[in-house]
Amino acid sequence: MTIGRKLATGCCTALLAAGSVAGPAGAEFDRPPLNLYGVTGAVDMPTALEQPEGELSGSVSHFGNITRGTLTFQALPWLQGSFRYSQFSGLRLEDNPGYEDYLDRSFDVSVRLLSETRWRPALKLGLQDLAGTGISSGEYLVATKTFGGDLALSAGLGWGRLGSYNPAFSTGTREPIDNGRGGNFNVDQWFRGDAAPFASAIWQATPRLSLMAEYSSDAYDLETGNGAIASQRILDRDSPLNFGAVYRVNDAVTVGGYYLYGSEFGVSLTFQGNPNRPPVQGQVIRAPGPVAPRPSRASAPEKWIETWAARPTAQTTLLGALERDLAGSGIDVESLQVQGPNTVEVRIRNQRYGMAPQAIGRTARALSRTMPSSVETFRIVPSSDGLPLSAIVMRRSDLEALVLEPDASAQLFAATGFADPPARDRRAALSPSVFPRFDWSVGPYVRRVLFEPEEPLRLDVGVRAQATYEPRPGLVFSGSVTKRIAGNLSDSVRQSNSVLPRVRTNFNLYNEQGDPALEKLTGAYYFKPGDNLYGRVTVGYLERMFGGLSTELLWKPVGSRLALGAELNYVHQRDFDTQFGFQDYSVATGHLSAYYKLPEKFHVQLDVGRYLAGDVGATLSLHREFANGWRIGVFATKTDVSAEEFGEGSFDKGITLEIPVGQFLGRPSKTTASTTLRPITRDGGARLEVDGRLYDRVRDYHRPDMQDSWGTVWR
């Protein structure tokens, strides 16, 4: 028996005997190390430890001639997913001889099957490179037990490349790697073939420093030149033993150093963040004004007279008072209507607060300070671009009674009504300071292209000027232009090899010829055609590559988790210089969509219809949303385009990330930074990019989503 096998056997024995000496389950390893693959592990092997829920990690590692960049998300306490981009410098594959380096994209997922207890180790199942070319594919079962809060021992079995060194047994025939287009799930390979043991030990020497040793079951056949499809040797592997040390510099940054396989040195750099652990603790924000209690009828009967409601100037007088009270608060009052002596309806636009209930609560407080005592019912109608989103109905007496209660948020939510907003009554007093409305801004932009074979990262930086004009509620004219200052997007010489209409793969030509660029120039009309219905019509230069007409209809009851939508577009492809001209290609596209809010703040969306290249299919999206506005999700599209016609990647898929900027500024803001990561851009499954789609702007002010962040209503 080799020393490595003895180590693996020893770890297994320790795990089996763990119960007699183990301390409390999972103690101290609240943020365990990531391995060189960027997933929770030791040096090169995985462990069954888990990151905190919501942890988002971006890591870069290098050893030998292998560089890996990985984005990992702990979606649930038991579910982790990763996207990885790897560069194998000097590795030439026999069926891909055109490049000196081999670049590979891969997805991983791991699921914790058993949680650690006092007597039992945690158990995790993992799939590595489950839908890529198969170069890095492997599967594993791993168990981990912690001891005394600072020691974690792990042992597991690996298949695929994780079962390539000194296998213990076989579970059948594993089909050879097919590194052609990639993108398909290699189900026939999962947990097939040789199975080999691996093991590791992690010692948390100090709160910042962790030391580790492991026995690896990865023979690195491909990289050492022992595989059947490689023609170069880029790594020496003289031993199965690996050693490492990782140091947490601060709450967001970790560095690591390693000695691997008896021959190689490695390093890693990891950045971590978590919606539940914001980078700036607390926010600098003006405290809301108090809830003003009314005097009793007996003590001040003159305050309760109702004849004021019949005065012709009542609406404009109260509108002015409310506007003055909310001045500088980030809440604009669009209109106010007196609906008798006991009810007032006010329409507002939230310009500042990422948490919708916070804007509602501050408006309700202001109403308590400015409305006559006879007004008992506040109807607050939030709007976006003049589109009413919901009607939130509060009783003034509830505000007065609950403001000092310990469970005030829960009680107020139970007492608050949510209704479909009516069309704006023409008798309402419109604020002269809101319409017509003109906004403009000038700021920087960054445009990037990832994962090209010739250059993994290309980007441009420049200046973007944009403006919006709203002559009346619901009617919006907007546009933006950009001018590049520096960058290398135009240096790309890669030409599209797509057999489909080149609706996206000619992006290099837009980057090369479109400077300065008219990004978009549109007119949009938002309206409510009926109960629980919302509509949009947009016309103009809709995005950098297409212009035309886009229409949308959404059905979304304010209390429902379900929404249904329909979108129909007719567009022409724009000239590469992104000025005012069009090319010959035109297409009608459209989708039927279903949206549903799942438990645990997950949202699922299914879109079925026709895409820009004329292909027909469906897109399934799933994203996790946190109470403070972070959103992380995945999507995949399959159409009637075959994998061969689609090209590299086989089908469209990717990761979406949206982070509220206010988390980094330390003050409330509705601005978000968002990005979409695709392994590769192809023409199949490409959807029109148009601003102002309805679901996300509408649902924020509906009951299911408001409930998630209702605690901010008193802030």
Image (cartoon, rainbow, N blue to C red):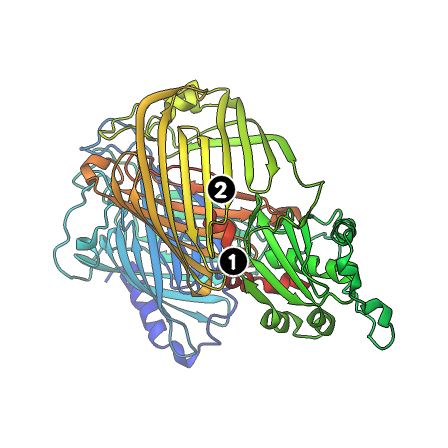
Q: Is residue 31 in sight in this rendering?
A: yes
x and y, in percent, of residue 356 in the image:
60, 56
Residue at point 76%, 65% (across, down): 291
Q: Picture coordinates of residue 630 (x, y %)?
A: 52, 52
The residue sitting at 18% across, 45% down in the picture is: 177
Residue 97 screen position, x and y as percent: 22, 28
Helix, strand or loop under label 1: loop
Q: Earlier in the sequence, mark 1 or mark 2?
A: 1
Q: Is residue 446 above or below residue 356?
A: above
Q: Is residue 453 left or right of residue 483?
A: left
Q: Amino acid at mark 1?
A: Phe
Q: Relative to the observer, which residue lies in front, 105 or 226?
A: 105
Q: Quadrant of residue 314?
A: bottom right
* Camera-nearest residue between 551 and 457: 551
Say which residue label 1 marks: 626
Between marks 1 and 2 in the image, the one whose residue lies nearer the viewer: 2
Q: Where residue 442 sits: x, y (%)?
A: 62, 29
Q: Is residue 246 visible?
A: no
Residue furthest bottom as drawn: 20
- To which residue does mark 2 refer? 692
Q: Are marks 1 and 2 in contact (CB under 8 Å)?
A: no
Location of residue 243 with respect to 227 vertically, above or below = below
Number of disc labels? 2
Q: Amino acid at mark 2?
A: Gly
For the N terminus, the quadrant is bottom left
Picture disc at residue 136: none
Badge 2 element: loop
Give the spatial CA distance, label 1 vs label 2.
Answer: 22 Å
Q: Nearer the viewer, residue 628 or 320?
A: 320
Q: Quadrant of the C terminus?
A: bottom right
